[in-house]
Image (cartoon, grey):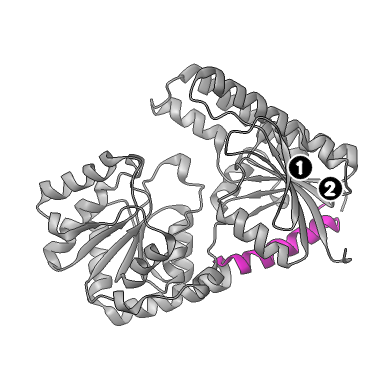
Amino acid sequence: MKASDLKYLFLLREPFPPFRPDTVVLFAKELKQRQHVIDWIFQSKDPVDKAYKTEWDGGSAWVGATDRGAGIVSKLKKQLLGFRVDLSIIPQARKKQYDFIQVRDKFFAAITGLIAAKLTRTRFIFWLSFPFPEMYLYRVNDGESPFPLLDRLRGYFLKFVLYKIIMPAADYVFVQSDQMKADVVANGVNPERITPVPMGVSLQSLADWSADETKKTDETIVLYLGTLVKDRKLEFLVRTHKQVVDKIPHAKLYFVGGGQDEEDEKRLLDEAEKLGISDSIVMTGFLPLDEAWQYVNNATVCVSPFYPTPILNSTSPTKLVEYMAFSKPVVANNHPDQRKVIEESNAGYCVDWDETEFAEAIVKVINNPQAAQEMGKRGRQYVEQYRSYSAIADTLDGLYRDICAGKFDRKA
């Protein structure tokens, strides 16, 4: 093994095989190319009775058993098997000498990971990608929790464990956004050992993809790419489009993606019919990635409506930077990470969650094609510099090496 190699053990909340781009692209591809040798601990996505070991992207992967049944007993069994996976970090950590142990989004595993790090005299890093304690409390306060007392207790307990035990004891903490860092610091965690790592996009995947020029169109397309689930409240976008077609009658709104069931699409189509704009709405359903990208490539302007809730303010939406990677001008609503990206890139407009403001921004983009083209260019440049997984990997690689060199040690 080269002297410059970093070797670490990584336990994730995500099941095996993983699907998140920050796992599959950032770690398994980009950081692997930078001499990172990663061993993994997962729980299986598919039902398996026994844990097993396999090879995944250059490292060993220990995959724990699970139960995918729908009943109460099966769900309880799955949780117990998950605890077994979390405990396995201790014996796995003692098999090799790792530069550090990292846990993402699993709180009990973080406790066992801290123990493993102490036993093996290595460093421990915790990665938080979503505010889980606050989510449980928000569900209770918003009246959405089916078990309010249980969720309230769970929320407060996890807040205590996260902010009073895990993060203070960790050698370093990664979070998803600047807003999440501010929220974590507000809970008493040392800001000097916290770095935001936002979601990015794989420019290499785009480079390997080629557009089908036979499918180019001269339509004026307002495009939304993503899921149509009810929680997204995309009726907002349909009502916005009514104001757009009042000024630009030939404009079409494309929903590239699908919902959890037929009701999700029907709800949007019913709203369009009520407003008399059914002919201006196109729904593609779920598509293979190559086909979805073809629609993005044909778009005139791409939109990222992100329903504003306190619990989602600290997330890092991927959609916006995916559009920008295609050199598309964008319109988004105010959300900390979206606002940061648009203000820094000047790749489009960021407005309030307001149908009229959103519609006016879309119309402005459509009616000013030269300015829109310049926005698209600036967006692509911004992604290349800050939000490609290659750029993020360079930053993360440097941070990992500084952590292992003791730069952030408490006595440093």
Question: In the image, residue 233 lies at what x, y percent?
Answer: 30, 44
Q: Quadrant of the N terminus?
A: bottom right
Picture layout, residue 357 above or below residue 329: above
**Residue 310 pos. (x, y %):** 45, 40
Badge 1 element: loop
Bounds of the magenta segment: 387-409
Residue assigned mark 1: 170
Residue depth check, mark 2 versus mark 1: number of the one nearer the observer: 1
Give neighbour class at mark 1: few <14, some 14-19, many 20+ (Cα, 10 Å). Answer: many
Q: Residue shown at 79%/51% (left/top)?
A: 8
What secondary structure do most residues of the magenta stretch adopt? helix
Tell me, yes or no, if residue 197 can be seen here: no
Question: Relative to residue 9, is residue 70 depicted above or below?
Answer: above
Give the residue at mark 2. Answer: 410
Residue for point 22% across, 42% down:
267
Judging from the image, what secondary structure is the residue with disc 2 in?
loop
Residue type for callout 1: Ala
Residue 381 is labelled as: none
Residue for point 62% across, 53% down: 23
Tally of marks? 2
Q: Tell me if 254 is positioned left or right of 147 in this view.
A: left
Q: Report if the CB atoms under discs 2 and 1 are less than 8 Å apart.
A: no
Q: Position of residue 210 (x, y in %)?
A: 44, 76
Residue 109 location, quadrant? top right
Q: Amino acid under label 2?
A: Arg
Residue displayed at 48% across by 25% down: 70
Q: CA distance from mark 2 to mark 1?
A: 10 Å
Is 278 situated left or right of 104 in this image? left
Front in this rendered view, residue 78 or 302: 78
Nearer to me, 76 or 170: 76
User: Few, some or many C-alpha atoms within 10 Å of disc 2 (few <14, some 14-19, many ≥20)?
Assistant: few
